[in-house]
Image (tube, grey):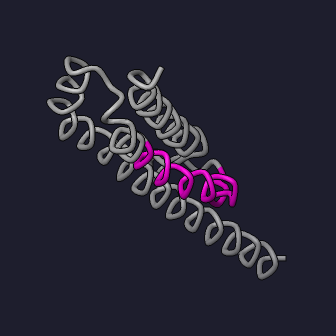
């Protein structure tokens, strides 16, 4: 059980990060400028999930460090070889979360400005 725990935590962290990225894309992070559908601001739940993601991305490596003595030599060697590449993958997805959250916030800002300007335009015309 100790041998598979770091790998399981890594997969969980990756799926968590993919989920956050998917939420941001669904909420409009990658909409084009000419798409005038309203984009909501980034929800607090997504922000909290992103903070949790930071800890989840670190968890497999901390658990490996704690359980290294209990892990079989072959599996420990595999973890040692895959340590840096797996950290790069999780780091890339962590950065992707931040970028997509920023893009969604930027799109939401444009939506809010468009709403304010359209309301102002309607009140001055009438």
Q: Which quadrant: the C terminus? A: bottom right
Whether residue 47 appears in magenta in the rendering, the answer is yes
Most foreground residue, 11 or 123: 11
Q: Position of residue 29 (x, y in %)?
A: 50, 49
Measured along the vertical axis of the image, is residue 39 above or below residue 63? below
Whether residue 52 appears in magenta in the rendering, the answer is yes
Most foreground residue, 126 or 20: 20
* Residue at the outermost bottom position: 124
Residue found at x 40% / y 49%: 58
Residue found at x 22% / y 37%: 83
Most foreground residue, 76 or 70: 70
Q: Position of residue 47 (x, y in %)?
A: 60, 59
Measured along the vertical axis of the image, is residue 79 above or below residue 75? below
Measured along the vertical axis of the image, is residue 26 above or below residue 114? above
Classify residue 112 as left or right of residue 22.
Answer: right
Classify residue 48 as left or right of residue 19.
Answer: right
Residue found at x 42% / y 46%: 57
Q: Position of residue 73 (x, y in %)?
A: 21, 21
For the record, the magenta segment spans: 38-59
Residue found at x 18% / y 41%: 84
Q: Quadrant of residue 72?
A: top left
Classify residue 47 as left or right of residue 96.
Answer: right
* Residue at the outermost right position: 126
């Amino acid at each position: 059980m100790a041998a598979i725990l770091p790998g399981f935590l890594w997969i969980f962290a990756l799926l968590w990060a993919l989920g956050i990225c998917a939420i941001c894309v669904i909420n409009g992070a990658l909409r084009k400028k000419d798409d005038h559908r309203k984009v909501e601001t980034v929800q607090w739940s997504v922000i909290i999930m992103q903070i949790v993601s930071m800890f989840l991305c670190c968890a497999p490596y901390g658990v490996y460090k704690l359980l290294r003595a209990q892990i079989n030599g072959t599996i420990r060697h595999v973890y040692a070889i895959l340590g840096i590449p797996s950290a790069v993958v999780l780091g890339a997805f962590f950065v992707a979360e931040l970028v997509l959250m920023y893009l969604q916030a930027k799109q939401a800002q444009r939506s809010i400005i468009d709403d304010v300007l359209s309301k102002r335009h309607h009140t001055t015309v009438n």
